Amino acid sequence: MNDIRDVKPPVGLPDFWWVLWLLLVLLAVAAGIYFLLRYKKSHRGSLKPQTPQLPAWEKAYQQLEALRRENLLDQGLFKEFFTRVSDIARHYMENRFNIHAPHMTTEEFLYYLGISGHLNETQKIALKDFLNSCDMVKFAKYAPTLKEALENFDLAKRLVDDTRV
């Protein structure tokens, strides 16, 4: 019976409570510093003077004028011209009516406008003609005349004129 021994008594763990409390305090201080810096950073940006944004129609007028000055039609770049004038009109509609027009197909865009009530019937028909003629040049390789291109440009400008506030 010499090889059988009694169970040893439980061993006491060292007193590490002070380490746990120290880690908890350090974590709280670090979190406090993080949120304080984040708060200061977010409020520092709000103190900057806000630059006034141009109204949607003024921005569209500037873009149309810049397009006219580029003389793409004189260079024979009809597809680029129609693409740009279509993009200007779509971005104008997006900024003016909060419609994601640049990301929609022409049919989706026209359908949305049909149910939204933003445009009257005459404006809807003009916009439909405008977008369809742009799509013909952009996707169907239609070769427009200079007169058609200028009429399309005027349609875009008239759209902006008719829908501005």
Image (cartoon, rainbow, N blue to C red):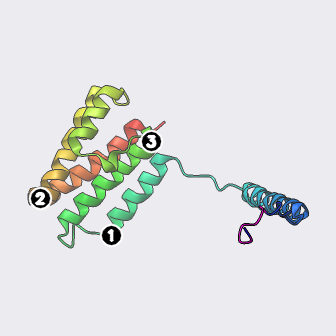
In the image, which residues are magenta? Answer: 2-7
- Label 3 belongs to which residue? 96
Dot 2 amino acid type: Thr
Label 3's element? helix
* Of labels 3 and 1, the one closer to you: 3
> What residue sits 9% from the left and 60% below the top?
141
| 106 or 63: nearer the viewer | 106
Label 2's element? loop
Dot 3 amino acid type: Arg
Horizontal side, residue 25 vs residue 53: left or right: right
Q: Are marks 3 and 2 in contact (CB under 8 Å)?
A: no
* Above or below, comparing residue 159 to residue 53 in the picture: above
| 9 or 69: nearer the viewer | 9
> What residue sits 83% from the left and 59% below the top?
24
The quadrant holding residue 76 is bottom left
Label 1's element? loop
> What residue sits 44% from the left and 57% below the top?
62
* Above or below, comparing residue 19 to residue 130 in the picture: below
Residue 38 is situated, as x and y percent measured from the top left of the image, at: 74, 59
* Above or below, comparing residue 77 to residue 139 in the picture: below
Q: Main secondary structure of the magenta part?
A: loop
Residue 162 is situated, as x and y percent measured from the top left of the image, at: 38, 37
- In three-dimensional space, the C-alpha distance between marks 3 and 1, rounded to whole angstroms, equals 25 Å
Residue 46 is situated, as x and y percent measured from the top left of the image, at: 73, 54
As drawn, the label of residue 145 is 2
Comes first in the chain, label 2 or label 1: 1
As drawn, the label of residue 70 is 1
* Of labels 3 and 2, the one closer to you: 3
Dot 1 amino acid type: Glu
The quadrant holding residue 120 is top left
